[in-house]
Image (tube, rainbow, N blue to C red):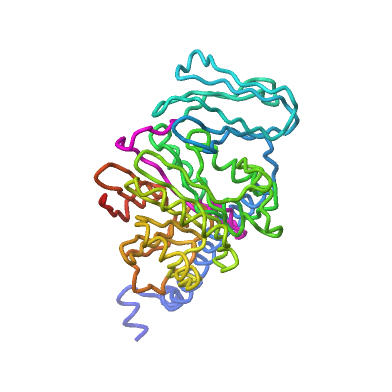
Amino acid sequence: MRKRMKELGFNNELVRKIRASPKKKLARTITINITLTIALIVPMFLYTEVRMLDRQKDYPDKEPWLRFLSDPSNSVTISWETSIGKNTTVQYDTNPFTLSNTISRTENVTMHHVNITGLNPNTQYYYRVGPQVDGEMSALYHFWTAPADQATSFTWLCISDTQESSEGQHHHPRVARALAKYNGEARFIGNGGDVANYGSSKRSWDYFFKCARPYAPYQPFAFALGNHDDSSSHTAPMYHQYFAFHENEPLYYSFNYSMLHYVSIPVPRGKESELTTELMSWLESDLANSMDKLYRVVIFHCPILSSGFFGRNRILEEHLHPIFDQYNVSLVINGHSHHYERSYMDGIYYVVAAGGGGHMDPCHNALPETQVLGSFPHYLKITCTTSSMTMEAISPEGSLFDQVEMEAP
């Protein structure tokens, strides 16, 4: 045999190499796998650590943010925070080159809230605030007032659960960059709660506002209280502070925007104790007085219908759904369970839109009412016209993965 192998040009050394090659291949494969594993894990670990460290920093000086405290067609509230006490000045106008209107206060404060009234409906205003810590006025920003009529079409956005994740995963910066593309187009932005992960931690709020900088100065917030916003104290003092609620002011409110009636109620945990007599009486009265509007949208944190961890909330279904049905609510938006879900029950669309920031949750227990279900970062774009209200669910990269049209009654 060896003689025959030599005749064919083989030698013992080559045979040994050939026989040894499977072991070398195995060793090489193991080495490559270990190297690839390290190459994948180490960057992920470093990324998570960097993100966690980033959240531990203080960001006391904040760009302005907006909210409606009264009629959106003629007023807006502008807020910002400075690290040291400063007086308060807002300059604004429809002409960005003049900014001929000024509101000033001389007391030195760190939290600044200025409610501007007497604005013209359906008008774009430009503004800047200050002085900043460096003594200068801020950059120039803009916002829109609401139309005074009920026929002007408009677009608004909605997100939920913008909180950072303790695991280091956080999608809000990605979503924020997508939302910023609508500055000047989107009239306001809803948020279904869990704005910050630790509602009693200033650093948690600092981090939210840092991430929200691309869109917050341009799109007025319309929040609902989440359980994380209300953590530990159950009085949500920092939520009150940042969004210009008075100390004892209830956290439910509503406003009209053209043909839309928008309602926010504080249901952060989905407990019966949250559905107080005062709240339920206000909700029924508010919806009853809105029947001249084409669309009614209600936003609150804990969902009635969810295919995620929290499932179906029988308490909320029993107490809230009949009211929504009676007053022809078109759309209910929730958060809490970190996924996307569109359900349909008795003519009402229920949407879980909790892909605004926190880590995504599994959602595999589809309910009979569920029509669309998925777990990925997203935001809602909602367009209101006299003929229909169209809701689109969009990824931060711009992929449309759900759309539904609700015809006007």
**Quarter of the figure that contains the N terminus:** bottom left
Q: Which residues are magenta?
A: 144-171
Q: Position of residue 377 (x, y in %)?
A: 44, 54
Q: Is residue 133 magenta?
A: no
At a point 44% along the width and 76% down the height, the residue shown is: 22
At a point 39% along the width and 50% down the height, the residue shown is: 380
Q: Position of residue 383 (x, y in %)?
A: 33, 44
Q: Nearer the viewer, residue 13 or 211?
A: 211
Q: Position of residue 41 (x, y in %)?
A: 56, 60
Q: Nearer the viewer, residue 40 or 29?
A: 40
Q: Is residue 379 above or below residue 14?
A: above
Outermost bottom residue: 1
Q: Position of residue 296 (x, y in %)?
A: 38, 51
29 relative to 346 in the view: left or right: right
At a point 63% along the width and 35% down the height, the residue shown is: 62
401 relative to 45 in the view: left or right: left
156 relative to 135 in the view: left or right: left
71 relative to 110 in the view: left or right: left
Quarter of the image holding residue 83?
A: top right
Q: Nearer the viewer, residue 60 or 15?
A: 60
Q: Is residue 163 magenta?
A: yes
Quarter of the image holding residue 7?
A: bottom left
